[in-house]
Image (tube, helix red, strand yellow):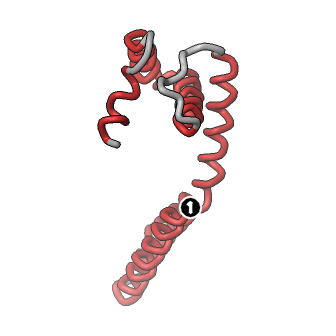
Amino acid sequence: MISDGLSYPVSGDGAVSRIVVGTLLGLASVLVVPAFALLGYLMRVLASAARDEPEPPAFDDWGEMLVTGLKATLVVIVYGAVPIGLFVAYGLSGAYLGDAGAAGSGLLAGFGLIGGFGALLVSVLV
């Protein structure tokens, strides 16, 4: 199974061009738009692998890859909003309320620790 996963990207015709284009998109992902195209291609690869196709899809239909990448990004943002919101809320509550004094800061630190673990649990469940 591991050998199948490692040999999948280089299988079939055009393996070198797929690797070069994927590498260039990965390096250019700091410009944001190539990241959407790369994520769209990764969604296409997942669908191809689920259908047990012997080789990965080609880099074609760039518009469809961009739209699919934008949809996948939206899904990641929606699913990640709750855990990120919890982490931010507990981090801010510890930062602002931790200055309440020496007596209350230990209690607030414990609250922040428990809240952080709760947010971590929610992020794992999501």
**63 or 57: nearer the viewer:** 57
Report which quarter residue 11 is drawn in: top left
Please give the name of the residue rendered at 68% of the width and 37% of the height, measured from the top-left corner. Answer: 71
Please give the name of the residue rendered at 52% of the width and 26% of the height, measured from the top-left corner. Answer: 38
Regarding residue 29, the answer to whether it shows in the image is: yes
Q: Is residue 117 above or below residue 69?
A: below
Q: Position of residue 16 (x, y in %)?
A: 37, 11
Please give the name of the residue rendered at 63% of the width and 16% of the height, measured from the top-left corner. Answer: 62
Q: Is residue 76 above or below residue 118?
A: above
In the structure shown, which secondary structural element does the residue marked by tag 1 occupy? loop
Amino acid type, callout 1: Val
**119 or 76: nearer the viewer:** 76
**With 31 as the anchor, is 16 left or right in this view?**
left
Q: Is residue 36 above or below residue 15?
A: below
- For disc 1, the marked residue is 126
**8 or 109: nearer the viewer:** 8
